[in-house]
Image: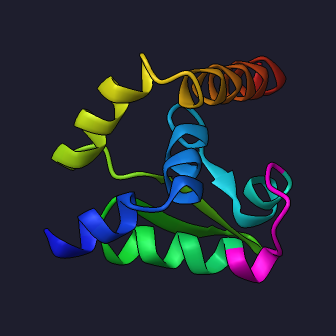
Amino acid sequence: MQRVFEALSSPVRRKILAYLAHADLTAGEIAAKFEISKPAVSQHLSVLEVAGLVTSEKKGQFVHYSLAPDHLANTLNGYVQEVCPVSKPLKRESAEIAKGRRTDAS
């Protein structure tokens, strides 16, 4: 539980969770949303993965990150993000990314 609280203590990591709310993203796609280095984003993703909040899967040459759906902290965080003025737009953007990918796959 300590790792979960440490992971959620960072605003950047909470924003990453919001971006992953509806779409799996690569580290590069996530890094493009922030004004921090790609190695810093990778470190944040590592903290989230160690805490069990995200999972990663290698697809080709890219690693795709997604929320760990069965983690209670993600469920609670998702609820909080619905009313958070910072996270709500990020979740909306995540949904648009997912919708665009579904449209492209059709």
User: Which quadrant of the figure has residue 105?
Assistant: top right
Pinpoint residue 63: horizontal percent, then vertical percent. Answer: 65, 69
Pinpoint residue 66: horizontal percent, then vertical percent. Answer: 50, 51
Looking at the image, is 89 positioned above or below residue 75?
above
The residue under the point 80% across, 48% down is 33
> Colour scheme of this structure image?
rainbow
State the count of labels: 0
User: Which quadrant of the figure has residue 27?
Assistant: bottom right
Along the horizontal axis of the image, is 25 left or right of 67? right
Q: Is residue 45 located in the magenta-colored stretch of the structure? A: no
The residue under the point 61% across, 40% down is 19
Is the stretch drawn in magenta largely helix, strand or loop? loop
Pinpoint residue 57: horizontal percent, then vertical percent. Answer: 53, 67
Along the horizontal axis of the image, is 68 left or right of 81? left
Pinpoint residue 18: horizontal percent, then vertical percent. Answer: 53, 38
Looking at the image, is 74 positioned above or below residue 21?
below
- Quadrant in which the N terminus appears: bottom left
- Quadrant in which the C terminus appears: top right
User: Which quadrant of the figure has residue 69?
Assistant: top left
The residue under the point 16% across, 45% down is 72
In-front residue for pair 13/23: 13
The residue under the point 65% across, 77% down is 42
Residue segment shown in magenta: 33-40
Along the horizontal axis of the image, is 82 left or right of 79? right
